[in-house]
Structures are given as C-alpha cells and as structure tokens.
C-alpha cells in the first residue's frame, strides 16, 4: 500500500481540491490558493512522484485517482469541488467520471488530448529529464520546457524570474527528474474521451489561448463532450495558466463556484 500523498489544508468552508500539473508542486498554487482559502477549505497535494510525495508514479491516471481518493478519505472529505490544471485536470476529469459522488464541481484547465506537435516537443523533454536524472545539466530541461510551457510575451516580461527558476531546477534530486519523465510519459498516452459523457457535475473548462501543449481546439472538444460544460478562453497565456494569469484564473474559478453554490441553494428544499 502506498503512502498517503503529501498535502496541505488552508482555510475553512466547503472543501476545494487543487490538483497539480505534471511538473508542479503544491507550493506552486500559492497565488491561487491564498485567495481561494478566504472562502473555501483548500486542499493541496503532490501526486506520487512529485517533490513532496516521492515514489514511483502510477503507470496511468487511474492510479493517481486512487491516490487522491485515499487522501480524501483519510482527511474526511466525502465530496469536494475540484480544480485541476494540465495533468491534474486529467486526473480531475477521471475522478469526476469514476467517483461522481465525491466531485461536486470541476474546473479543468486541460484538454482531451495532446497534439502530435507536442509529442515532438516531448521527445526533447524526455531526453532532458533522462540526462538530468543521470547527473547531467538540469538547466537544459528548463531550456526545453520554456518555449513549450510559456507564452513568448510572458518569457520576455519575466526573464529575470525565469532565469532564477532555471538555476533552482538544478537543486532538485535526481529521482525527481526520473519521476517527471514518467509523469510526462503518462500524459502523452492518455485518452479520456470514452469517460467524458459520464461526468455529471457542473464543469468549467479553462483554456489558454496560446497553449502549445493542449491547444484551444482540444479544449473546445473537451467542453463539447461533457454535458452542460462551459468553456472560458483566457487570452494572452501559454500552457502554465496558473503562473501567467493567476488573478484571472482565480476570478473565473470563484465566479464558477459561486454559480454552483447558487444553483445548489435554489434546488435545496425550503
């Protein structure tokens, strides 16, 4: 039996679970989690194989869903709102489809599948993670990630901050790079389209207009496949939406969650 996922809980109120992108850690949510925790009990976690939850990642998304369900059970959460970005969005979709009673609503900043163009980019990312895991220059992974994950405008405006992150990447342990490669591999092969019609909770799909990994047409397809889902496009952002547009991300999530709460209140017996 695997260990419980490393996690953090902030705030009070209705539960709200944040699910990481593949190369994130729960600390990356800070600009998002702080304002959300003013209104919700915000739960963050690192997936197995991420920085605070070391271990071999599951081979597929179902394994990550099982880990998340075990965490929710352990901390006594029967039903929660869920916000997931990138890989975490895929886990959120699978969770909503397979454990409908545990997901009250879902914000998925992701898409149905990645493109052939990203599979080409992923080959360079695989080489870089493998070299870093073997003791090579970890900064080369950041160089490979930069144009794929971020928009050109963001890169130009945040060059100093990004250079600092490049240096910090080299301080991570070798096992993290091996795990990142495994998570990336599972992302390349996912196909959740068969389970999307089973999602019954209120769903918002957030799409970054300049996303090279999960482009707009795929986000549109995702929203169209889920009954009643709404699509919101955020202009001027690359794939890492929670980093490039955190304020807009929070506003969209809060507006959506307020609409869910209003609908639930209207249906409640008087």
Image: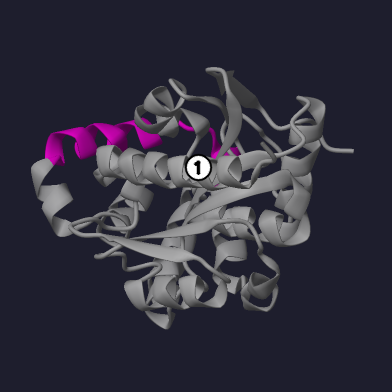
At mark 1, the secondary structure is: helix
Q: Based on the displayed image, in which of its 4 quarters is residue 74 positioned?
A: top right
Between residue 223 and residue 45, name the one nearer to us.
223
Name the main secondary structure of what is drawn in magenta. helix
Q: Is residue 163 magenta?
A: yes
Between residue 61 and residue 142, name the one nearer to us.
61
Q: Based on the displayed image, in which of its 4 quarters is residue 182 positioned?
A: bottom right
The residue under the point 43% across, 61% down is 125
Q: Quadrant of the C terminus?
A: top right
The x and y percentages for residue 265 are 58, 40
Does residue 230 appear in the picture of this structure? yes
Between residue 10 and residue 183, name the one nearer to us.
10
Q: Which residue is mark 1?
A: 262
Q: Is residue 81 magenta?
A: no
The x and y percentages for residue 201 are 63, 57
Q: Quadrant of the N terminus?
A: top right
The range drawn in magenta is: 158-177
Does residue 181 appear in the picture of this structure? no
Up-down: is 105 above or below 123?
Answer: above
Would residue 6 be found to the left or right of residue 163 on screen?
right
The x and y percentages for residue 241 are 33, 50
């Amino acid at each position: 039996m695997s260990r419980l996922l490393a996690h953090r809980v902030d705030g009070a109120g209705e539960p709200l679970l944040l699910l990481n992108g593949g190369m994130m850690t729960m600390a990356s949510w800070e600009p998002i989690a702080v304002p959300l925790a003013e209104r919700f009990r915000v739960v963050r976690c690192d997936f197995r194989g991420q920085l605070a939850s070391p271990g071999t990642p599951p081979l597929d998304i179902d394994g990550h869903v099982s880990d998340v369900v075990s965490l929710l059970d352990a901390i006594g959460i029967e039903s929660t709102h869920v916000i997931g970005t990138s890989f975490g969005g895929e886990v959120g979709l699978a969770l909503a489809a397979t454990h409908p009673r545990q997901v009250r609503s879902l914000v998925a900043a992701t898409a149905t599948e990645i493109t052939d163009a990203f599979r080409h980019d992923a080959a360079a990312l695989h080489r870089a993670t493998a070299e870093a895991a073997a003791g090579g220059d970890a900064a080369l992974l950041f160089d490979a990630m930069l144009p794929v994950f971020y928009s050109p405008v963001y890169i130009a405006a945040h060059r100093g901050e990004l250079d600092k992150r490049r240096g910090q990447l080299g301080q991570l342990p070798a096992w993290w790079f091996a795990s990142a490669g495994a998570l990336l591999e599972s992302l390349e092969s996912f196909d959740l389209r068969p389970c999307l019609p089973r999602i019954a909770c209120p769903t918002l799909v957030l799409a970054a207009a300049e996303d090279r990994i999960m482009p707009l047409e795929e986000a549109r397809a995702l929203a169209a496949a889920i009954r009643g889902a709404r699509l919101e496009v955020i202009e001027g952002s690359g794939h890492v939406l929670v980093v490039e547009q955190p304020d807009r991300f929070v506003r969209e999530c809060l507006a959506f969650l307020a609409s869910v709460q209003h609908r639930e209140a209207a249906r409640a017996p008087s």
